[in-house]
Amino acid sequence: MSEVYLSLGSNLGDREENLKRAVFELEHWEGIILKKLSPIYETKPVGYLNQDMFLNIAVEVETNIGPYDLLKVVNEIEKKLKRQRLIRWGPRTIDIDILLYDDIELNDEVLTIPHPRMWERAFVLIPLSDINPFIKKGDVYIKDLIAELPDKEGVKLYKENWYNGV
Ligand SMILES: Nc1ncnc2c1ncn2[C@@H]1O[C@H](COP(=O)(O)OP(=O)(O)OP(=O)(O)O)[C@@H](O)[C@H]1O
Ligand SMILES: Nc1nc2c(c(=O)[nH]1)N=C(CO)CN2
């Protein structure tokens, strides 16, 4: 079994409900075991700024699904939740990114792992450090990376213990 970390975000429609539905799909997907869920954070949009606040979480799963097939799974879940993508980095009902997959490093036109922009995104690293504070980039703990990030001020705790199925 492989240890995988995912980042989920929503800023369209009922954001908390979207996160719940996505986690429910992951939890019930054959070959995926849900291990840890972070609290929900409310976060200022990064990249494309003229959009509503996001809710973001990090999730740890165990799986025997390989990285490329797992990308298909998360894309299928996004589709099921009727994600509409009109603007790059723009509003979305749900976005699921694969952050880390064991110690695998991949970089091709389909998939990049670790996720190339994760290390500079407080909305990714803050929930991630809640579920595993021992993750490092090279020899630097993510807590120390977070301390240097300007957008950390835009990340506020929104809700703990929020998932109990849907
Ligand atoms: N680690 C990864 N996790 C998820 N998608 C990835 C990853 N690496 C590459 N991709 C590719 O990125 C494509 C675009 O993804 P997506 O539309 O979610 O980007 P985005 O969420 O708008 O921006 P960002 O990638 O900066 O979060 C996906 O179709 C997928 O093939
Ligand atoms: N706060 C926040 N900003 C974003 C997010 C996100 O999930 N949260 N996702 C993006 C594209 O992946 C771009 N910007």
Image (cartoon, grey):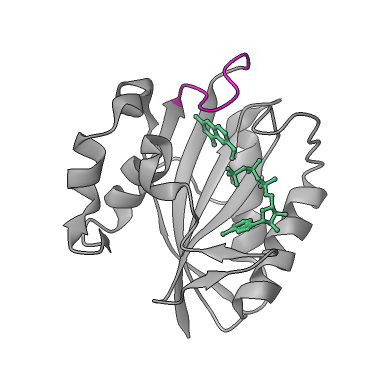
Residue 56 in picture, x, y percent from top left: 49, 37
**Region in magenta:** 43-51
Residue in front for this viewpoint, 150 or 15:
150
Q: Height in image: 133 above or below 85?
A: below
Q: Is residue 166 visible?
A: no
Q: Among all residues in the image, which is located at the extreme top? A: 50
Which residue is drawn at the image coordinates 20% and 46% (left, top)? Answer: 143
Q: Does the stretch in magenta take in 49?
A: yes
Residue in front for this viewpoint, 165 or 85:
85
Badge count: 0
Q: Is residue 70 visible?
A: yes
Q: Does the stretch in magenta take in 155?
A: no
Left or right of 31: which side holds 154? Answer: left
Residue 90 in picture, x, y percent from top left: 68, 28
Q: Among all residues in the image, which is located at the extreme front? A: 108
Which residue is drawn at the image coordinates 36% and 36% (left, top)? Answer: 122
Residue 103 in picture, x, y percent from top left: 39, 76
Residue in front for this viewpoint, 127 or 23:
127
Which residue is drawn at the image coordinates 75% and 29% (left, top)? Answer: 87
Residue in front for this viewpoint, 94 or 99:
99
Residue 25 in picture, x, y percent from top left: 67, 58
Left or right of 98: which side holds 39? Answer: left
Chief secondary structure of the magenta span?
Answer: loop
Left or right of 48: which side holds 80? Answer: right
